[in-house]
Image (tube, grey):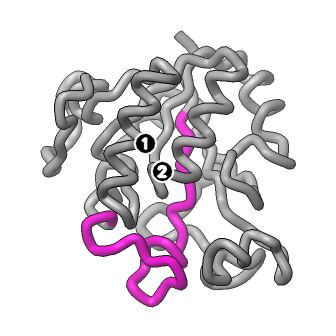
């Protein structure tokens, strides 16, 4: 099956303690797992696409959330631990879904993608909305549960349940999905798989 990895909003404003919408220390635990997924997909010559919040200075989203990830700012920068390489792509977004107002759909179509793996933050917002739009485009969806995080633990759990039950997403740890080759990381599927 042709797979692509989406790396959502692993940005300074979400993942750095000085960020405007820091997801918390617990969220930082996904960084090595996301890195391992990127390494694996690149080594298999599969598409890796970073989706990066890049808002206009006056974006209406700031009516809902603190000002964050303004295009070309430190906050919209991808964290140092996960810097893109020549083998990866970066696609800017300004809405919750990674498909809205950019070329993600065309990139996945050109790669003849059949299955989308989604990692990053926030599980209950951009991850879930991108998963829903992936299913609306008939992609199979895979959520490595130890590669997604949220600033709200209850919303995180609700989003995982919704993606499983409504979108038919496959939920499992990265180790389970990749045949046990990734380093152990504390995680829980809480009975979703």
Looking at the picture, how far across and down is residue 106, in whole percent?
83, 31
- Which of the labelled discs sits on residue 6, or is there none? none
Looking at the picture, how far across and down is residue 117, in whole percent?
49, 32
Residue found at x 44% / y 27%: 142
Q: How many marks?
A: 2
What's the CA distance linking mark 2 and mark 1? 5 Å
Looking at the picture, how far across and down is residue 43, in whole percent?
45, 34
Question: Label 2 crowding class (10 Å Cα cut-off): few <14, some 14-19, many 20+?
Answer: many
Above or below 20: residue 112: above
State which tag comes first along the sequence, 2 or 1: 2
Q: Which residue is mark 2?
A: 124
**Would residue 101 be seen by someone viewing this image from the given angle?**
yes
Label 1 SS: helix
Describe residue 44's horizontal placement relative to residue 72 as left or right: left
Above or below 68: residue 18: below
Is 39 one of the magenta-colored residues? no
Describe residue 65's horizontal placement relative to residue 94 as left or right: left
Residue found at x 80% / y 46%: 100
Residue 9: name its quadrant: bottom right
Residue found at x 28% / y 45%: 146
Span of residues in magenta:
5-27
Quadrant the C terminus occupies: top left
Q: Which residue is mark 1?
A: 159
Residue sitting nearer the eye, 128 or 52: 128
**Would residue 35 be seen by someone viewing this image from the given angle?**
no
Circles 2 and 1 in contact, beta carbons < 8 Å:
yes
Residue 157: name its quadrant: top left
Describe residue 24's horizontal placement relative to residue 184 as left or right: right
């Amino acid at each position: 099956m042709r797979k692509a990895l989406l790396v959502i909003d692993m940005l300074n404003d979400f993942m750095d303690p000085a960020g405007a919408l820091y997801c918390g220390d617990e969220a930082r635990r996904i960084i090595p797992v996301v890195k391992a997924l990127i390494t694996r997909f690149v080594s298999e010559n599969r598409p890796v696409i970073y989706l990066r919040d890049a808002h206009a200075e006056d974006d209406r989203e700031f009516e809902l959330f603190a000002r964050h990830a303004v295009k070309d700012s430190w906050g919209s920068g991808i964290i140092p631990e996960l810097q893109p390489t020549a083998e990866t792509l970066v696609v800017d977004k300004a809405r919750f879904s990674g498909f809205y107002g950019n070329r993600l759909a065309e990139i996945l179509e050109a790669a003849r993608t059949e299955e989308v793996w989604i990692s990053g933050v926030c599980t209950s917002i951009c991850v879930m909305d991108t998963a829903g739009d992936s299913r609306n485009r008939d992609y199979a969806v895979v959520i490595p549960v130890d590669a997604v995080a949220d600033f709200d633990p209850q919303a995180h759990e609700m989003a995982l349940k919704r993606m499983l039950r409504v979108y038919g997403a496959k939920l499992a740890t990265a180790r389970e999905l990749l045949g046990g080759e990734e380093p152990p990381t504390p995680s829980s599927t809480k009975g979703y798989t």
